[in-house]
Each structure stands twice: as structure tokens, then as C-alpha cells.
Amino acid sequence: MSRSQRTGEKGGFTVQTELNDRVVLVSGASSGIGAATARAFGAEGARVALTYRSGRERAERVAAEVAAAGGQALVVPLDLTDLDTVARAHATVVERWGGVDVLVANAVRWGGAAPDPTARFEDVPLAEWRAMIDANLVGAAAQVREVLPTMRARGWGRIVLVSSGVADEGLPGPGPYGTAKAGLHGMARALAWQAGPDGILVNVVAPGFTLTESRPPFPQSLIDELAAGTPTRRLSDAADVASLILFLGSAANAHLTGELLREGSSAARAHRVGP
Ligand SMILES: NC(=O)c1ccc[n+]([C@@H]2O[C@H](COP(=O)([O-])OP(=O)(O)OC[C@H]3O[C@@H](n4cnc5c(N)ncnc54)[C@H](OP(=O)(O)O)[C@@H]3O)[C@@H](O)[C@H]2O)c1
């Protein structure tokens, strides 16, 4: 029995991820949630393509961890502000491994400085709206467009779009980021109907305030305050989010599609200090 078939065994019931040798494309895998997701798929024996924008060396380090965990890894550049790079990244993966079985659209264009809760809606330039929507919404559509033909031909696919609790709970200050993320929810609903007949399941994960190695350190008092607002009294970390993405992006997810899953911290309103 393969490693992936053993995953999730409980008593007489076996949940099979069936990820061994599956080709998984994780965009934005050079840090944070994307890196943890790449590691999680690697540990299931998957072939993982990791994209980076500026952090090639970081991506290479994560790729080494994927390989050490039993997967295979390929590092490719992808920049959401230049959507031609999405097609190029996909072509590189196809050349190496033939096609993508699982897409995790996780890369994000954060924009400039951290969101200013006092900034006024009307002061955000339209150019910033366009840039945020183009990168984070059209950019996700571009990733999906690339992988769909192979998934349809194979009659199997899993797509996970990474959103944010900000999308449906809002954030004080201007809203291009949350608006772009909210668009992913509509995209997943439409796509679930479009691609469902071909065996492709599409879902959205909305993390709340998630502790990652790429976040600046926060005072413990703030972390404690935010954690107190969650059902579990703790904030999520990148591995928590990755475990949910792994489930949705595997055969263990047998028939869930078009859904939005709010990850633990997302219930906290913790995101009021950041996305
Ligand atoms: N962390 C949170 O609290 C939180 C909360 C809600 C939602 N999320 C969502 O979770 C996802 C991952 O967030 P994270 O906190 O793990 O982020 P992160 O650590 O900052 O990583 C972001 C990733 O996206 C890449 N990236 C940055 N700009 C890009 C661009 N213009 N084009 C393509 N890739 C780009 C980065 O690549 P380089 O570093 O190589 O440039 C990196 O791999 C995002 O979609 C985010 O919106 C995060």
C-alpha cells in the first residue's frame, strides 16, 4: 500500500489522498502558506511545482524539503503582474510532467504598504483597484485557464483558490484586496458547475490571520488577544491551512465542490490588523 493510501487510516475506514505522483502546482510557494502546502503535498509523494516571484532561493529551499519528504519538486517563476508568466510557468510544468492534476492558486499581490485602517475608500487610485483585481482575481482565472484542458481530458482535477476572511468580513480601510478575494468565491461557484461534469472539484479556502514565517513578529499580547476571538483560542499557522488545502486538493475530497471553507482563525475577526 502506498504512503498516500495509508494517509488518514482510521479503524476499518481508509481515506485515500491518492496523491502519489500526482502533479500539483502551488503558486506563491516560496514562503508562508504556499510553502507549507508544497511540503504537505510532497509528503504525500506528489510531484510539486512551486512558483515564486522574487524569492527563488527560498523556493529552492522549500523544493529541497519537498524532495526530502518523498516528493519531487520543480521551481518556476510566476508573476501575477505579468500574466504571460502564468502560461510560461504552466508550459514548463507540462514539459516536465505532462500536465497539472491539482492547482493551488495561492500567490498574492499584496500591494504596497500594509493596509491603513484610516485610509479613505475614495483616496485609493483606480490604478490600484485595477492592479489588485488584475493580479489577484484575473491572475487566478489565468492559472485556472491553463490547467483546465488537461484536467478535463483526464476526467479528474482538484482546484483550490486561496482567499481571505477579509473577503466576506471586510477590513477597515480601503477594499481592493478583499474585493479581489471575494471575486474568487463567485469564480469557484461558476467553475464548480462548469468543470464538475469532467470530474473537477473547485473550492475556496479563506484563512484568517495566519502565523507564518514571512509575517513580521507581532507582540505576544496582540496574538493572545486575537486568539481569544477564535473558537479554539489559538491562531492558525501555515501548516493548519495547508492541511485543509491538502484535503481539498486530493482524492480524500470525494465530492465537495463550489464551497468556501473558513479556516480556524477566520472566525476571529483577527484580520482587523491585517489580511
Ligand atoms: N497570512 C495570512 O494571515 C493570510 C490571511 C488570509 C489570506 N491569506 C492568503 O493566503 C495566501 C498566502 O499568504 P501568505 O501569508 O502565505 O503570503 P506570503 O508568505 O507573503 O507569500 C506570498 C507568496 O506569493 C508570492 N508573490 C508575491 N507577489 C507576487 C506576485 N506579484 N506574483 C506572483 N507571486 C507573488 C510570493 O513570492 P516571492 O516571495 O517569491 O516574491 C510568495 O511566494 C495569499 O493568497 C493570501 O492572500 C493569508
Image (tube, grey):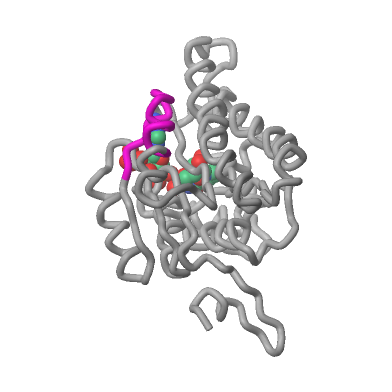
Q: Is residue 31 visible?
A: no
Residue 121 occupies which quadrant of the picture?
Answer: top right
Q: Is residue 18 visible?
A: yes
Q: Residue at coordinates 52% horizontally, 16% vertically from top-left?
A: 130
Residue 83 coordinates in the image, percent (x, y): 43, 25
Q: Residue at coordinates 54% horizontally, 52% vertically from top-left?
A: 101
Residue lying furthest front: 153
Residue 251 coordinates in the image, percent (x, y): 63, 64
**108 and 233: which one is in front?**
108
Q: Is residue 86 magenta?
A: yes
**231 and 222: which one is in front?**
231
**117 and 176: which one is in front?**
176
Query: Magenta residues?
Result: 76-90
Residue 59 coordinates in the image, percent (x, y): 30, 50
Left or right? Give the position of 255 relative to 111: right
Residue 90 occupies which quadrant of the picture?
Answer: top left
Residue lying furthest bottom: 11
Q: Residue at coordinates 75% horizontally, 58% vertically from top-left?
A: 255
